[in-house]
């Protein structure tokens, strides 16, 4: 069940990709105003343009917090990838410097550490931090096969291998995805993201049946910060990589364009399956 929203505008701290726009559109369709804090260098101008917004550098934490308050945002969602910069690149404002002092070493313990610490501080400051899934509940991928094509026994063995590997790698805040072929881990997602990882696969693939993409939330990850996301572009990249299909965590993965994604997978002869963890 999603969180019961408070009255007033929804504040959206927007990173990259199209999900911030989907969250904003969904909230608006539910009768809520929205205000987007767009993170400079990550948020895409064309995505936030239809909504009230302002761009901020990531280190302007004090200004971001004040702007959310001024616009009446008690509920806040963080959505879209924002990779942790170096301390030198962060250039915090005065409030941001105080925040970093409160966060301490967690700010430099990987992307998840920073996001979780920001959630904690926003909560302590009186904001209620929601997950994108609280707004986009109908976009969470369900359990079971979504496509006409199904994985065979060998493909499911690769899926199981991928799940086991990601539980270990995810606990170390390394990544949410991997590619497994014939029991061999061909690639792990790190800071480059899933699409860049998939681009490496043709040079790594072995002869014989293609591999599978497995994507899961990291164990212990605060799901208000960065749920795994799949979309139509993922299907194109999986097909170009010569893979056989995708397995994702059911109930814990956002499918940003499910009908188009499933249609593209059917056309490419790929399977897409939601699995329990």
Image (tube, helix red, strand yellow):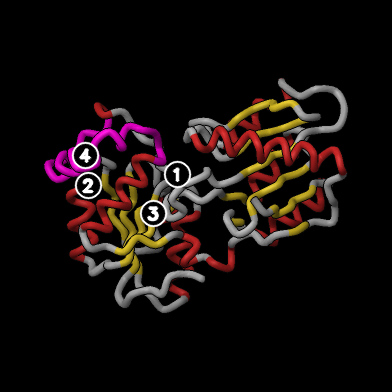
Q: Which mark is residue 61?
A: 2
Residue 62 at what x, y percent from top left? 17, 49
Residue 12 at what x, y percent from top left? 36, 59
Distance CA(mark 1)–CA(mark 3): 9 Å
> Bounds of the magenta span?
89-112
User: Do residues under tags 2 and 3 come within 8 Å of each other at their CB atoms?
Assistant: no
Q: From where the camera sits, is residue 82 visible?
A: yes
Q: SS of the residue at dot 4?
A: helix
In depth, the one of 64 and 273 nearer the eye is 273
Distance CA(mark 3)–CA(mark 4): 18 Å
Q: Residue at x 46, y 62 (%)?
A: 23
Distance CA(mark 4)–CA(mark 2): 10 Å
In depth, the one of 162 and 70 nearer the eye is 162
Residue 188 at what x, y percent from top left? 60, 30
Q: Is residue 98 magenta?
A: yes
Q: What residue does disc 1 label?
A: 81
Q: What residue does disc 3 label?
A: 78
Q: Residue at x 80, y 22 (%)?
A: 206
Q: Earlier in the sequence, mark 4 or mark 2?
A: 2
Distance CA(mark 1)–CA(mark 4): 20 Å
Distance CA(mark 2)–CA(mark 1): 17 Å
């Amino acid at each position: 069940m999603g969180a019961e929203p408070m009255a007033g505008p929804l504040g959206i701290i927007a990173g990259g990709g199209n999900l911030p726009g989907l969250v904003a559109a969904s909230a608006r369709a539910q009768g809520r105003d929205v205000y987007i804090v767009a993170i400079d260098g990550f948020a895409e101008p064309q995505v936030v343009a239809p909504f009230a917004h302002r761009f901020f550098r990531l280190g302007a934490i004090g200004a971001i917090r004040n702007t959310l308050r001024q616009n009446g945002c008690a509920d806040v969602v963080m959505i879209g990838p924002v990779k942790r910069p170096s301390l030198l690149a962060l250039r915090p404002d005065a409030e941001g410097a105080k925040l970093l002092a409160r966060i301490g070493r967690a700010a430099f313990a990987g992307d998840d550490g920073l996001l979780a610490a920001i959630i904690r501080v926003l909560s302590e400051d009186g904001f209620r931090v929601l997950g994108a899934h609280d707004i986009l509940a109908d976009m969470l991928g369900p359990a079971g096969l979504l496509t006409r094509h199904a994985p065979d026994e060998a493909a499911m063995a690769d899926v199981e291998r991928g799940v086991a590997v990601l539980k270990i790698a995810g606990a170390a805040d390394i990544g949410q995805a991997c590619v497994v072929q014939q029991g061999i881990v061909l690639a792990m997602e790190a800071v480059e993201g899933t699409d860049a990882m998939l681009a490496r696969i043709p040079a790594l693939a072995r002869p014989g049946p293609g591999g599978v993409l497995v994507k899961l939330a990291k164990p212990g990850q605060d799901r208000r910060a960065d749920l795994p996301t799949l979309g139509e572009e993922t299907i194109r990249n999986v097909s170009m990589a010569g893979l056989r299909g995708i397995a994702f965590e059911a109930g814990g993965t956002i499918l940003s364009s499910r009908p188009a994604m499933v249609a593209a997978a059917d056309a490419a002869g790929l399977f897409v399956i939601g699995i329990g963890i």
